[in-house]
Amino acid sequence: MDPEKNKILELVAHAQAGDEFSMGELFERYHQAIYRFHAYRVGSAEDAEDLTQTTFLEMVRSLPQYHPRAGISFSSWLFSIARYRLIDYYRRHANNIPFDKVSPDEYTRMQSDTTNPDYDSRIPMIRRQMRQLPENYQTILQLTLLEGLNLREAAHAMKISSLHARVLKHRAIKKLKSLMPEYSFNYEQTDQP
Amino acid sequence: MNKPTNHKKPTDFGVLFKHSLDDQLPQTKVKRLKNTVLVAFRQSQIDTSPHATEEKFIKNRSFFNKLILRPMIPVIIAIALIITGTGTAIAADQAKPGDALYPVDRAIERVTYNFAFSDTSKANMLVKFAAERENEQKNLTEAGRIADAQQASVDTKQALQNAAEVIARVQEENQESSQTRAGQALNTVEEKLLELQNRFTERQREEVKNRVKNAVGEVEIEATTKNGQTTVIIKFHSQEIRYTLNTTDNDAIIASVQERTGLGTDDIRALIRVTADDSSTADTETDDTPGSEETPANINTDTNTPNLTNQNNNLNYEHNYNSNYNNGVNNDFNYNFNGNTSSGSQNADQGSSANGQDDQDQNRNINESGD
């Protein structure tokens, strides 16, 4: 078994027993992923921070009910919590947050990224178009492509079957590509910054 | 065609994706966030077992409540409707004649009456309705809504009459079937009715008194029945007229008063205060009984009194008024009094002739029944 996964299971067990250090370690390991998950979706850094906090508080509250399962990482459990917090947020802000828009500070951050050697003009576009996808499309793409969860774990986090997760992922990529036809993911496409 | 070099393969979609997601939480914020989480964690460790079970119980209960409440929704709506309906009914209960909800009030009363189980409770209800009418009348009079108050007065009279009729009927039925318990219950209802009737007449009297007072001045009429005779005292301003009739018939008394004052029959009926002197009537039904000797000497009212001008005249009165009586009379009011004795006796003759006729009729009836 993966030593890293073993280490995490150990930390979870200690935290469940009431060890504060283990709890801190878990936070250190996951806070960036959880923040990323939220920041990407809500656009505003403050809201993402709030969501991260509520996610971890919820994790603290329901940690006693967590039971490790073979082949399913702790992170998939954590992401399922994060996703529920996010859906909650969508529900509360359904009327006043334009999800398909990129906030100004986000935009400047993207522009400054041009100095990055890995910069690609499609990157901000991907981010912008992602917002137009259904919630479950966004989640499956984030969990599998970004956070490196396998399909089974992502399916567990989203409370769907593995088969459904696979189909969902395929459809999400197809949809995202269709949303940006001018930025085809082909060699022939010319770059237009 | 130039091949763009800075583009990656489609398989690098994941890489592109990753680069689009490079948001980082600042370290200061991470520290603060970690602190918050750890504090919450510590807190969760402090309140462990007992509170945890309690919380679990509450959680279960809230789930139970949800389960219970879902099928209850139609029931809740029904209850809400009933409450609002009752609200209208309660609001209507306060309605007075002339109010928008007054017909609703009466309709509700009719429905409740039809739902009444026993005759006694029906009678009770009618008395209650009459009380309500009476109260409405009072309120309307106080509010100065004269037309509505008159309507209420008519309604009250009708309600009292209805109640009295039902009580009489039920009493009869009870006597036939000798239901003592029902009779007792009915007696209390009847007492209530009597009290109400008294209050109603009292109020009528007050109202008429005020009206008459506004028109001509204060008038008091008292009648005392004794030994089949009636002494009537009329007080007007500072004058007093006293006379005696040889009858206890209300209509005759009222007619005689009307003769002298010119007031309306209804007004007199409301104003007159009839008291029965039981002490002497009990032992003196006829003139032959020794009790008749106890009758005061000043009432020389018998038909054979020599100083009467007319033999048929069974009416005697004393004029205690003085000459300025006539002058004090308001011109608006058609007052029938005459200052001199002769015309007064004339009036008395007219009044007595009618009364004498009545008495004759009564006697005839008695004779017929005797045969």
Image (cartoon, rainbow, N blue to C red):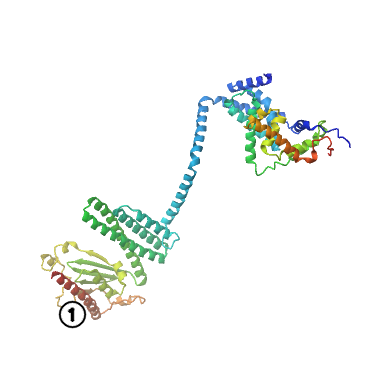
Percent x, y of residue B112: 37, 54
User: In this rendering, would A142 be left or right of B330?
Assistant: right
Whether residue B66 is visible to the viewer of this picture, yes or no, is yes
Q: Quadrant of residue A133?
A: top right
Percent x, y of residue B232: 23, 70
Percent x, y of residue B259: 27, 75
Residue bearing the label numbered 1: B310
Callout 1 environment at 10 Å: few (<14), some (14 to 19), or many (20+)?
A: some
User: In this rendering, would B343 be left or right of B209?
Assistant: left
Seen at 35% across and 56% down, the residue is: B114
Query: Given the current orientation, which residue lies at the most extreme right position?
Result: B1
Vertical order, A170 against B75 (above or below): above
Vertical order, A151 against B282 (above or below): above
User: In this rendering, would B300 be left or right of B202?
Assistant: left
Compare residues B239 and B195 and report the one nearer the observer. Answer: B195
Compare residues B84 and A166 and report the one nearer the observer. Answer: A166
Q: Quadrant of residue B209?
A: bottom left
Image quadrant for the N terminus of chain B?
Answer: top right
**Could you tell me which secondary element the residue under label 1 belongs to?**
loop
Compare residues B20 and B53 and report the one nearer the observer. Answer: B20
Percent x, y of residue A173: 73, 35
Compare residues B324 and A168 and report the one nearer the observer. Answer: A168
Image quadrant for the C terminus of chain B?
Answer: bottom left
Seen at 61% across and 29% down, the residue is: A59
Q: Quadrant of residue B282?
A: bottom left
- Chain of the residue under label 1: B
User: In this rendering, would B300 be left or right of A58?
Assistant: left
